[in-house]
Image (cartoon, rainbow, N blue to C red):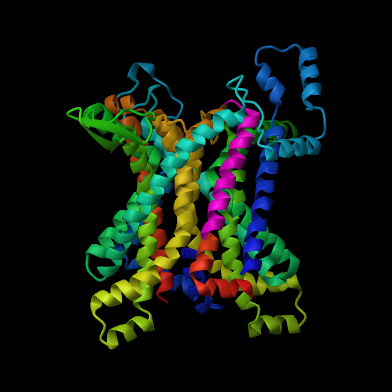
Amino acid sequence: MTAYVVRRLAWLPIVLFVVSFLSFAIMRFGPGDPVTVAAGQYRDPEVLARIRAEKGLDDSLVIQYARWVSAALRGDFGDSILQRTFTVSELMFPKMWVSAQLGVIALAIVFVVGVPLGLIAARLNGTWIDPFIVSSLLFLQAIPVLVLIPPLLWLFALQFRILPVGGWGGLIDIYWVGGVVALPIPDPHLYLPLLAYTLGGFAGVARLVRITALEVTREDYIRTARAKGLSEATVFFRHILRNSLLPIVTSVGLALASVVEGAFFVETLLGIPGIGSFLFEASRSRDYDTIMATTVIIAFVFVLTNLIVELTYGFIDPRVRVQASR
Amino acid sequence: MATATLERSSERDVGAGRGQWRELWGRLRVKKLAVISMVLIVVIYGSGLFAPLLAPYSYTDQNLDRALEGPSRDHWLGTDRLGRDMLSRAMYSARTTLIVTAAVLLTGSIVLGNGLGLLAGYRGGWIDNAVMRAGEILSSLPGIPMLILINAGLAPRAIEATRWIEDHTPLTGLTGTGFASYLIVFAGLSLFSWIGTARLIRALVFQLRERDFIMAAEGLGATGRRVISRHLLPNVTFLIVLQLSSGLGAIAGSEIVLTWFGVGVQPPAPSFGAMLFDGSGARTFQSHPHILLVPGVIVTLLLYAFVLLGDAVNDSFARR
């Protein structure tokens, strides 16, 4: 088990190295360099050359990359070109926090809705309801967020005027009843992004749970459990449910991927100051250090979560552990 | 999960021949949803393929006097902000989807995926290791951010490459068609789309190479290349159906998403991504809903058809 954990952990730096080096190489392979982008209209070649020499942009790519890595390891991701006087870290981490809050809540909803739905569909296998649920779920997975958000915005923000058009206002608002009782309610800015994030995700999870539950139901030990006279409830909760929940741990990775990718469109469309819209703006204006830092951080979170998921899985399911240590 | 089921189900079919095609077709034909999906895909792809013949207008024809009109007799699906015919734009966008999906499927999935899968599975050893590790690294990256980065960073170079091709070969007029942006979208998507196929093929080849007919071929002195191309390849080509149904929707969706971001296919080349972007404001939707609904409905139907078909194909495989 220890060897397995160590081997999986060794994977993280390798992937991060590949991501950061790829990003670095791709950015520098394009035309121009950070100084020309920062200079904008101002183009006195002598001054540009002097800044380049000062910042070490005349060195070879490998040396520049090594310098970037050593600075990044110390937490210094360079300066933003787009918003002068700010370092990338100062801009990036608050935005990451916003995205992380949204992402975690979205993941929770995905599982709270997806798992029971999948179990219900599996339970109703053989009736018309099961194929109905499955094709509805497939439809939810197929409809792109890009198509979904504008009508939702129109309906709730312009037509009914019950939700804001976009933006971010924290998680919880305090609602005073009669000036005495403080009621915490979710901030209205949350509903649309969460809806957009979760539709595809819970559909995916529900389908996975359904398939697993159906497979488990066909196992011999379920027949044995029924044959020895256990009640249907016991069979379902103790045998089917527990065995179907194992693969759900892996689907966290799946759901996470859909949330991370959804973040770009949802945040951009709804004006949420998160990491997705941040990278969107940065990549439009070739803000070198910002793009590098954001890509690497997103990859870091992504790979780390998948790693944790995998390790948890090995921890829960002894079969995986045994296989891995061989 | 899906791949796992497929791998397991394909174990049972090891070595089966061309009769599989007929059998799968027979199974799919009786599924109403699968047939409807196929018809839908054929209609959308067909209108893309024959867009130059079918489209009533060119996709660049502007008529500012008739901008933002709803559906009418002249313009069946209305006109956009610049007075361009939405029906014609949609047809040419379907053409873009067709080109990108076909090209990525061909190189990324079929050539790279099959080739690397066969090689890794048959040769094993360090080749297998290298291919699988590369795939593992690529698949552990977050796809969309990486694609955005690749496209944004390399697009100018692709334009230079296009100019170079125009100067040094008889091909001309490429720059105007947005060839460079097609190239870059295609390259980026291919980079990520071979992994699933390669894994599937490799797993199958691992079982196949222990079979008697492979040993017989090797015993008779067949070269590695011959074993791969004459004995292994015909036995795995069947899996292309699976790649078709599961991969096409994802590829089509990625192109749309990238173009929406502004790093995919560049204007004036038409794309559903660009059309969706035009209609993505809530105010626009309030006053001119058809700007979003025309591409939105088509894209949703197409992607839905792909997932339904993929699901049906999966089912047919699993039930063998």
- Give the residues in magenta: A285-309
- Quick one: which residue is furthest to the left in this view? A178
Task: Using the image as rendered, state which of residue A103 and residue B104 is in the foreground.
Answer: A103
Residue A230 appears left or right of B200: left
- Quick one: which residue is furthest to the bottom in this view? A228
Residue B207 % position (x, y): 61, 77
Question: Where does the C terminus of chain A fall, quadrant-wise?
Answer: bottom right
Location of residue B243 with respect to A218 vertically, above or below: above
Task: Using the image as rendered, state which of residue B294 and residue A308 is in the foreground.
Answer: A308
The prevailing secondary structure element of the residues shown in magenta is: helix
Location of residue A15 with respect to B289 vertically, above or below: below
Question: Where does the N terminus of chain A fall, quadrant-wise?
Answer: bottom right
Residue A152 % position (x, y): 29, 36
| Residue B77 seen anywhere in this rendered image of the structure | no
Residue drawn 37% across and 83% down? A221
Q: Is residue A193 magenta?
A: no
Location of residue A54 with respect to A174 vertically, above or below: above
Residue drawn 59% across and 41% down? A297
Residue drawn 59% across and 67% down? B201
Residue A64 appears left or right of B193: right
Residue drawn 46% across and 30% down? A273
